[in-house]
Amino acid sequence: MFGELSVVVNEFMRQEPLLLESIGDPRTAPKTASWLDDTCRKIRRDIQSRKEIFRDGLMALEGILKQDDDYHGHISDWLRCHCYLYGGLDPKHTATVRDFEIDFLLKQFDGIYGIKKRETDPTDTVDFNLREILMDLYAQFESARDCFRLLSRIDSLARSDHRDSKEINHYWNVSASLSAMFTIDWASFGREELFINNGYRAASWLREEGYVSPSAHILQVGCGIGRIERHLALMAGHVYGADISEEMIQLGKEWLSCHPNVTLFKTDGSRLPLQSGTLDTVFSFLVFIHINSTALWHDIFKEAARVLKPSGCYLFTIGADISRQNRIAIESLGERVGLKTDRIIRVNSRRINSFSYEWDWLFVFRKPTPGPAVATLLDNRL
């Protein structure tokens, strides 16, 4: 199937406009204050992006049909693709688009994924029908699309430009009260199994990149309810999570109560209740996109530098659209608090954050190991 994706996508994109033209263009998103709508409008204006997103959707469908080890991740990917593609479609037209797409895919893949036998183990076979699977996926899509209506409610109840800790605290407390899992990770659509799977992606990336080991003490700044900590608990010695929202922390403590090596705590960013020089890694993923305060950036950097061991790493991701000037400013901020730039690179955000089709920026800082002169001075003081 993978070898045929390009042909399928091109053929689908040739036919799709004819259908959409007859029922109204879904790429015209409603004009609201929601920044999700702004993002979707940009994506829908770009036909090439739509092709890439639909191709990802088909690849996710391939994974769903195979029921491979990343089954939940494929469900998440498929829902995400279709929320981007058809999230602005008038609900009364959804069935028309659904039937069009299902009939198209059935014609393309008949004989590949029609009614057939699929081995689940050496002694069992299961009949499955592609039409039934697609109908079920579209039913899930209808439910998933409802989640995005929560964002406008959050904007109206906790409108914030994220310029001080009190505003950010209020924003995330409201988010927690509406749907902690969805507002932390849109690609979960508020469903625990997807939320857990997407957290595993991020934790696995940290382990693969060498930032987590069985003896490591590690901290996430902006932990929410512990989506990543749940998995790091099985990979590290002790895991800490800090968040500005007391509501998120309370939910997280209940959700992770069976993991004794996880400690969650609230912070306003100015101080972490941890001893200096005790952590191997401090990290945060797309947290700084919610912080428009230079002072708060400085406080977080300063505290990260303080709690890290010599040679420990502080790493975080930020949006792909950050300017070169701002990247230089961030690097300079790290140096001012005593951190040395290790690397600044583009990273595939889908492997870490599970809800982006761009390559975000990854910043990695390292706390220098004291040189001989500094070590001698410290020894004399002791």
Image (spheres, grey):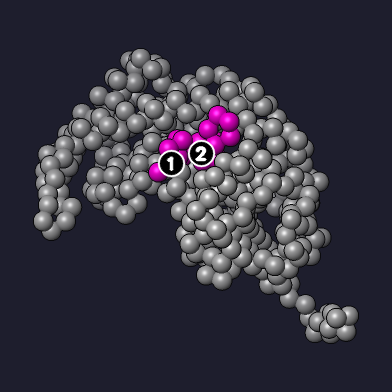
Residue kind at label 2, given as amino acid type: Met
Which residues are drawn in magenta?
176-193
Residue drawn 63% across and 47% down?
222
Is 191 covered by the magenta stretch?
yes
Residue 228 position in % (x across, y down)? 52, 52
Residue visible at 77% across and 46% down in the picture: 296
Report the side of 107 relative to 237 (left or right).
left
Assign the magenta stretch its main secondary structure: helix
Q: Which mark is residue 192?
A: 1
Answer whether residue 202 is magenta in the image.
no
Contact check, label 1 and label 2, Cβ < 8 Å: yes
**Of residues 131 and 18, which is closer to you in this image?**
131
Identify which residue is drawn at 56% across, 19% down: 31
Indicate which disc residue 181 carries: 2
Asked where in the image residue 184 lies, by quadrant, the reply is: top right
Q: In the picture shown, does residue 276 fall above or below 302?
A: below
Does residue 237 appear left or right of residue 132 in this picture?
right
